[in-house]
Structures are given as C-alpha cells and as structure tokens.
Amino acid sequence: MIRLALRETLTAARRAPLLTALAVITIAFSLYAFGLFGLVALNIRQAIRAVEERVEVRAFLRDSTSIYAVDSAMAAIGKYPEVARVEYVSQENALDRARSEMGEFTDVFDQAVLPASIEVHMRAGLRSPQTVAAVAKRIGSFSIVDDVRYGEEWVGKLYRLRTIASFVGIALGLAFAAVAVIIIGATIRMTVLARAKEIAVMRVVGATDAFVRRPFLIDGIIKGILGGILALVMTWATHRAVNEYFFQTVFFDERLMLVGLLAGAFIGVAGSMVSVGRQLRRI
C-alpha cells in the first residue's frame, strides 16, 4: 500500500515537475523563515544563559575573621542544593580584581582596603529571583558575614527578560508554523486540482477517500522533508555569512537539525490533510 502511494507520488512529480519544484521551494522558504527565527531565538537564549552564569551571591566578611571560620562557612554553603560552587576572595585578591577591572582608577586603590568575601555561584535552573534571595538570606545569617549582595534588581530584570523571550519565542514559532501549514496546504491544493479528473475516476471505480488521500499525505511528507533540507542549507549559509561579516553565532546541533526535518515532515502532512480534506469534498 505504501509502495503504491510512493509510486503515485513519484508519478505525479514527473507529470508536473514545475509544480513539484515550486511546492518544494515554497515550503523551503517558509521553513527558512522559521529556521531563521529559530536561529535568532537560539542565540538569544545562549546569550541569556551566558549572562545567567554570572548570577552569584557575594558575602562580604567581617574584619579579622579566622580562616577556620571561613572554611566552615564555605563547607556549609557548598552543601546547599542551589549552590554550584563556592569561592573565597581574600582582601589582596579583591584589590587586584578592582585594579584590573578599573585600571584608570589605579591610584584610588593604592591605599584602599577591600573586605574579603565568599562568592557563591548558583546552579543552572536555580537562578530565579526567589531562589537567589532565599540563598542570600541564609548566607546572611552566618555570624562572620557583614553584608550580602546579589544584584536583586539585576537578577529580577534578567529573569523577566528570559520569561518574555520564551513567551515571544513560542508565540512566533507557532505563528511561523501556522503560516508554513497554510503555504504547504496551498501547494498541495494545486496538485489536487491538477489531478481532479483522475481522482474523480478513482472514486467512480470504488476508491475510498483514505486511498485517494494517502498519496497526497506522503507527497506532503516528502515535500516537507525536501523543503526542510533546503531550508536547513539556506539557514546554514546565512549563519556562515553572519559569522564572516558581522558577529559570531551558534548553529543548531544535530538533535535540533533532526527536529527541524521532522517538523518539516509534520508540517507537510498537516498541510496536506487540511487541503486534501477540503478538496475531496468538492470533487
């Protein structure tokens, strides 16, 4: 049955190569737009993730705190499930950092004494404002801690940005997918209309709607996959051009590329189902 449907699909492609090529190219460009959006969303997510990795709680220590008290506090903080790692920054290291980061104000730090601190780096996925604030509050309860800073306002803005980016990404992704389904449906509809007489004859001799529909569904899958491959190539070429002439970006990994091809097949069959169902009722 599947072999017959494949043969029907190939026969239809040979009968109307221009229409088939037009359908594949149209699908490719619709998926290309979807791929470009996905690439932008991926790079925005990577940028946000890179910034999120800098989320930390910094506990400034009281003067004359013994190293044993520091080690004990660091061991306790390191056991928190939200904490990835803990780092001690001595007064000398803090001064060196300040000088390297603000070299133009080196003279200001010549006689400065900066407090030692404990830097607490949060685990991925546990960097929400509520989680960071809770960890900061627990750390502030240690007797050796004089002050705790974690950029409350900055962490809140970062979390809101990530939430907005995720929401916009899902909304635009669904919109692009819907447009692709409509375009694919239109191309399949042209194929159905071109074979209207043949379909009418098949129904006269007893062919069921499922039998008539099957080649078009397979046709949609094949065109979706071919369009997906072409869209992937165009997206990769755009990625290379941006890297060469503008700035560095990351590309989809193998898993995401496979998801893209499967999405092309799914969109192809979805467009075919919508279009064929409507046209069969009219023939």
Image (tube, helix red, strand yellow):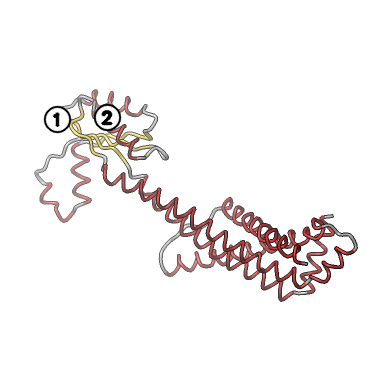
Residue 237 versus residue 211 in the image, above or below: below
Query: Which residue occupies the foreground of this view, 115 or 186?
Result: 186
Among the 4 quarters of the image, the one containing residue 9: bottom right
Q: Relative to residue 99, is residue 15 drawn left or right? A: right
Q: Amino acid at mark 2?
A: Ile
Among the 4 quarters of the image, the one containing residue 207: bottom right
Query: Which residue occupies the foreground of this view, 272 or 143?
Result: 272
Q: Relative to residue 182, is residue 164 drawn left or right? A: left
> Percent position (x, y) of residue 263?
62, 55
Going 63% across and 70% down the picture, which residue do you hit? 25
Going 79% across and 72% down the picture, which residue do you hit? 14
- Per the rendering, the mark at residue 63 is 1
* Quadrant where the C terminus is found in the figure: bottom right
Q: Earlier in the sequence, mark 1 or mark 2?
A: 1
> Percent position (x, y) of residue 220?
70, 61
Residue 10 versus residue 112 in the image, above or below: below
- Outermost residue on the front side: it is 282
Q: Which residue is mark 2?
A: 139
- Outermost residue on the bottom side: it is 18
Q: Name the element at disc 1.
A: loop
